[in-house]
Amino acid sequence: MVRLCPPGMARARWPVLAMMLAVALSGCATKYQEMGWSGGVAAEPVMTDVFRIVSRGNAYTGQDRVQDFTLLKAAETTIAAGGNYFLILSAADRTAVESGQTPSTVHTNFVGQTAYTTVTPGVSYNITKPGESTLIRVLRIKTGETPPPGAFQAQDIVNTIGPRLKATS
């Protein structure tokens, strides 16, 4: 039997191969979707007219895209709750940073009676996954009334951000 790598080396490569496969399978930015394995957005009620919007992206998703997820979900939630405007009560950055390191490698060559060994150290890396958590208040503004300062018109958000996000999904 011919062995292509030293004993134990094949087992050491499985975590690296699994990580490369996972990256290849999730190799694009998070789509606008309900919260799932690769991120997304979710809304949950806190009070009758207050909702928490949580958005998360993967390592290929920009912070601006996650912010668009939050605004669009807030607008959709507002309309579903019978409102037409919403206020952002608070927002918090929920970006996650994961660290890792690739394994070191050792390669030995024999030339005559002399062995030459090369050690290549592993590489450290960080993966940043943007996220945010936002509390909104749903407003029901009657025609002719002036909305409070800072209020977002839900249908306007759906009309402007919605097509942009759903076109790239």
Image (spheres, rainbow, N blue to C red):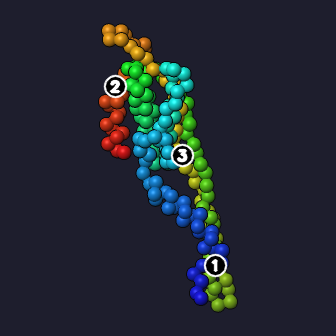
Q: Quadrant of the N terminus?
A: bottom right
Secondary structure at badge 1 equals: loop
Vertical order, 108 against 51 (above or below): below
**Where residue 64 appears, x then y in whole percent?**
43, 37
Crowding at mark 2 (Cα within 10 Å: few <14, some 14-19, many 20+): some
Vertical order, 106 against 158 (above or below): below
The reply to whether callout 2 and callout 3 are in contact (CB within 8 Å) is no
Q: Which residue is mark 1?
A: 6
In terms of sequence position, does the residue under pointer 1 or pointer 3 come before the other?
1
* In this view, the mark in front (2 or 3): 2
Residue at 36% of width from left, 39% of height from top?
165
Residue at 63% of width from left, 73% of height from top?
9
Question: Is residue 6 visible in this depiction of the protein?
Answer: yes
Q: Which residue is mark 3?
A: 128
The quarter of the picture where residue 33 lies is top left
Which amino acid type is marked by label 3?
Thr
Vertical order, 42 against 59 (above or below): above
Crowding at mark 3 (Cα within 10 Å: few <14, some 14-19, many 20+): some
In terms of sequence position, does the residue under pointer 1 or pointer 2 come before the other?
1
**Cα distance in 3D space between marks 1 and 3:** 34 Å
